[in-house]
Amino acid sequence: MLEESFHFDGRFVNTLKLLILKPGELSREFSMNRRARHVPAVRLYLFTSLLFFFVFAFSAGSRSETERVVDVDLSEMTSQTDTRPLNLYLDAEYRAKVALIEARKSGVGRLILLQWAALVESDDELNESGLTAVLLPLVIDALVSPKRTFEVLLDNVAIAIFMLLPVYALVLKLFYLGVGRRYYIEHLVFSMHLHSVGFIVLTALSCLALINTRGDNPATGSLWLQTGLVLAYFVYHYLALMRYYDQSWMKTSIKFATLTTVYGVLLGLTMFSTAAFTLTTL
């Protein structure tokens, strides 16, 4: 199954070239029933998304290894010296977990708990709201085994973004009612193509981040390249909308701005709910 999905051949290369170099054209090919010469949108999405999550996980792991050899100077970040104020909200099991986190003297997890303890001591409204009692055990579970938390979160994010595809396709359907009389599946294919390009850009950004960890300081040229890639994706999105839905630049500009806002809200809600789900199921 995997071999069939990710086998590289001339059709795959040609599909990628058309996808990247001519925004929206690959989706038009699907709508005009010229599909046999191209890789199916689902296979393309799966390949680009799995490639990104693999590179991102490797890049994040490399950065954590680099940071592990650098001591965190807690004195410059917080004046709090212990986590005892948190004991009021914890039972014996979670106090033992806090002790494990505190044992990592230069760990970021210890810094988070120290700052939380300082906040608890200084903010009466926070104490009365009950948020600490609810959130603190979840955060402690995540900090006890950060590597496992990261892996579970990454898996859940991959699933959540895949589930976001049909939602964004529905948004496109509503925005372009009566334009070209396109079926819902056509908007879904366009959504998958757009996300595939997004994953390609994110993969490139992860590779640049990984390269930056190898040096003492991020290169200025690399930072400019990362910024350029992000801007290029927004330009790509705009051009893809204009070519695929064949509307004027004015209508496309208005819909692009609104779609970007709506998608940003949907993505934010998706990431928040995914993080909350991950913390509550660890």
Image (cartoon, rainbow, N blue to C red):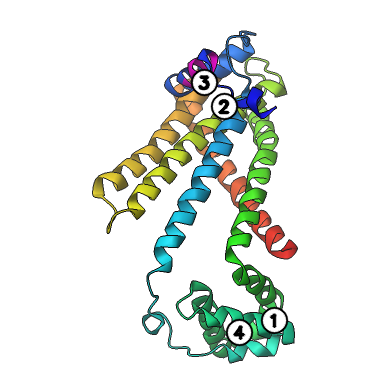
C-alpha distance separating marks 2 and 4: 48 Å
* Image location (x, y in percent) of residue 32: 62, 8
Mark sitting earlier along the chain (2/4): 4
Quote the CA–CA distance across marks 1 and 3: 52 Å
- Amino acid carrying mark 3 in the image: Gly
Mark toward the viewer: 4 or 3: 4
Q: Estimate the spatial distance between the alpha carbons at disc 2 and disc 1, rounded to whole Å.
A: 45 Å
Image x and y of residue 218, in percent? 29, 54
Above or below 248: residue 202? below
Q: Residues within 10 Å of mark 1 (few under 14, many from 20)?
A: some
Crowd tier of the residue under label 2, counting other residues whose Cα lies within 10 Å: few below 14, some 14–19, many 20 or above? many
Q: Are marks 2 and 1 in contact (CB under 8 Å)?
A: no
Please tell me the numbered disc located at residue 24.
Answer: 3
Residue 225 horizontal/vertical position (percent) = 32, 41
Residue at horizontal 48 percent and vertical 20 percent from the top: 248
Sequence-first tag of 2 and 1: 1
* Of marks 2 and 4, the one in the foreground: 4
Q: Earlier in the sequence, mark 1 or mark 3?
A: 3
Residue located beneath label 4 in the image: 99
As rendered, which of 102 and 244 lies closer to the eye?
102
Asked if residue 65 can be seen in this view, the reply is yes
Extent of the magenta region: 11-16
Q: Report the residue at 54% width, 89% height from top.
A: 122
Q: Secondary structure at mark 2?
A: helix
Tell me the CA gap for discs 4 and 1. 9 Å
Q: Position of residue 7 (x, y in %)?
A: 58, 22
